[in-house]
Image (cartoon, grey):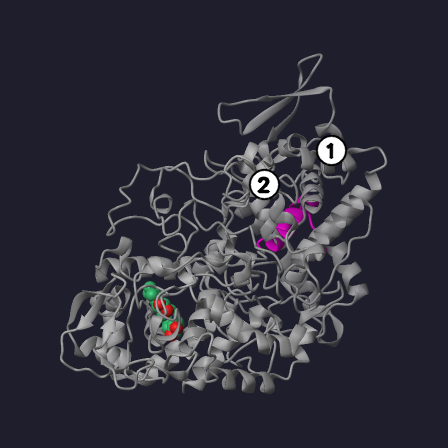
Amino acid sequence: MSAAECPVKKSNIGGGGTRNRDWWPNDLKLNILRQHTGVTNPEPKEFDYGAAFKSLDYEAIKKDLTALMTDSQEWWPADFGHYGGLFIRMAWHSAGTYRVTDGRGGGGDGQQRFAPLNSWPDNVSLDKARRLLWPIKQKYGSKISWADLMLLTGNVALESMGCPTFGFAGGRADTYEADESVYWGGETTWLGNDIRYESGREGPAGGGGGVVDGDEGAKKDHTDIHSRDLEQPVAAAHMGLIYVNPEGPDGIPDPVASARDIRTTFGRMAMNDEETAALVVGGHTFGKTHGAAPSDNVGEEPEAAPIEAQGFGWKNKHGSGKGPDTITSGLEVIWTSEPTKWSNKYLEYLYKYEWELTKSPAGANQWVAKTDDEIIPDAYDKNKKHKPRMLTSDLAMRFDPAYEKITRRWLEHPDELHDKFTRAWFKLLHRDMGPRSRWLGPEVPKEVLIWEDPVPSVDHPVVNDSDISALKKEILATNVEPTSFIRVAWAAASSFRGSDKRGGANGARIRLEPQINWKVNNPAELETVLSALEGVQKKFNDSASGGKKVSLADLIVLAGVAALEKASGLSVPFTPGRTDASQEQTDAQSFEHLEPIVDGFRNYGVGSSRVRSEQFLVDKAHLLTLSAPQMTALVGGLRVLNTNWDGSSNGVFTKQPGKLTNDFFVNLLDMGTEWKATDGSSEFFNGVDRKSGDKKWSATRHDLIFGHHPELRAIAEVYGASDAQEKFKKDFITSWDKVMNLDRFDVK
Ligand code: HEB
């Protein structure tokens, strides 16, 4: 037994050994707030990926990719002499990890190169696909990221097989470490699915979880594949799969139950029935599945493979281990008679034949057409022919009544399928890119799509410095409390999430459904603020010279800025140029996913027995792309500014509420105060004078965590020191400005 296998003696250097995570697995983790920072990235600090991408010879790389499709390599031969199917699957599995609930996952960061995705059971053989791309990545270097390259390759694969696409946009900068922020489920075994279907479960309590649901509700029987509920926010039916088990839920070959899982998981990916069906039908028009022999021929995944494998995993000892002997999913299906050409044959066969349950050579459930027609070519042997075959998840496209209605129409109208497929494919690849101002390259489509969350472009001169100071005076002259302006500006801007770059103040969507009615936005106060600002806006726009206009989105932020200047006595930056979106430009249903369940910045809501309040706070800070010091400065500042969502005094540790001071930290760290829980759930606390016993303050977990957690306390001590008053105010304003402009990709 080697040292690496010894269960007792672990490595004592290089980060090995028993660590804090092992000793205190429930401790609050801040690691997700310091990912992808300068030290992990080999590019120089000033590297601008957008500029690098703009210098890429786009036509040349597309030509190289097209040539690669049919340049079969001895070490991993191309099925049917064409890598198209494999590359489409690579792109699809890259983008398809996206979930609309928290915006995490997706192809935007090139995470398929890192664990766990590089080793997911569903990503078998994609290690080979990426390696086939290395010569092209090497040739173009920093001008194209892996993230862009994997997706562009999928697009070129489609085009090279006669399927014109809807377009392509680049602009996804690479990350260089495994992203720890995504909750993929609580299971500890691959393909396990117990925890995600068991409401009432305890589940993991570690940090870095996504926003997960509460733990109310009776325990459900998670073995009932017709009624089980998938845990939020996960978007896959099993740990290690992108979506659903191709054999059917839990391997049970039931097409209708499969449809249920498909609908849920693709729905979490922000796809409706039509988009889902288009993707499945269009995708499986190409390529084949691989299950030449039982899966026990296959070795360990890349993360667990030996060093000499150099990043490859799943070494296959069946036959040659490649080409006709490939084992990927363990299923052995070729959908159409022309697997390297766009056609309508998937649907033709799906409806032409009746289907019989059978087993793949690896023993997996799959379906074969009840026919003598041997019309399907072999991937390697020109003399061999096969019967049409399908996966259980393919039959879902026919046997689920809603999918059937859609796919029967496309059977008669192939052009409609092409249109729906290419649009859904474009959405799949670009869903997490954020606003159009981030989309780069010559193939950005002209048509504006609702899921982009479009904002109108600026079609009028914007306000200048003297307008801005005049407007600030107007704003402060209204009879609205300055703190209300701060609350509303924060509410608007902090709806942003860095995961899929949605939300933010631009568009002034806080005045539209659904944000206008979010409880956390305090609708009554919001209305007062909005009508005051609309008054200021009308007055300005009616009288300003030279057609100048100010948007409500700008005024919402400017009002916060003006109030903050008053509260701090310092000048606060403001960058105009926002515009106002209309309700028609807003997919209200899709925006509902941006509503915070718990928001520690505004002292809104409490955690559950599964996810503690402070974990929600860290999660929110991560979505706001904040570091731990920035989160600390913002919470401390927002508290003394008296901006809790409901105006409560929790955490408002100051005698001068509304004034920007470092009092939150000074008073939090004051040894004269003793803290006591006020209720059984340890969510609310009173701070009492240690000597007199008199109540001085009230607080939530969102507040007290800054005195409890050693790393947060270390930051709080910096801000609570006697030399920190000016530093704190400056840091607060810098972080405030960052949040106000998180969505301003148009000016970055
Ligand atoms: Fe797919 C393949 C499943 C969706 C595209 N897929 C495949 C396979 C499987 C599956 C199992 C095989 C793998 C191997 O190799 O073995 N899918 C599936 C499922 C689903 C899907 C379950 C859901 C329902 N796909 C999909 C989509 C797409 C696709 C959506 C796109 C769009 N796939 C695909 C392709 C392929 C596959 C292209 C082939 C690959 C090759 O050729 O290699």
How far across and how far down the image is residue 607, in percent? 50, 37
Q: Residue at x 70, y 74 (%)?
A: 51
Q: Nearer the viewer, residue 331 or 607?
A: 331
Residue at horizontal 38 percent and vertical 81 percent from the top = 419
Q: Where is mark 1, residue-wise?
A: 665
In this image, 393 relative to 596: left or right? left
Q: Residue at x 61, y 56 (%)?
A: 177
Which range of residues does the magenta coloring cover? 475-495
Kindly identify the residue that appears in the image at 46 percent across and 78 percent down: 74
Q: Position of residue 290 (x, y in %)?
A: 34, 69
Q: Residue furthest front?
A: 1
Q: Residues within 10 Å of mark 1 (few under 14, many from 20)?
A: many
The location of residue 711, given as percent across then percent down, is 68, 37
3D distance between C-alphas at marks 2 and 1: 16 Å
Residue assigned mark 2: 600
Quarter containing ligand 1? Answer: bottom left
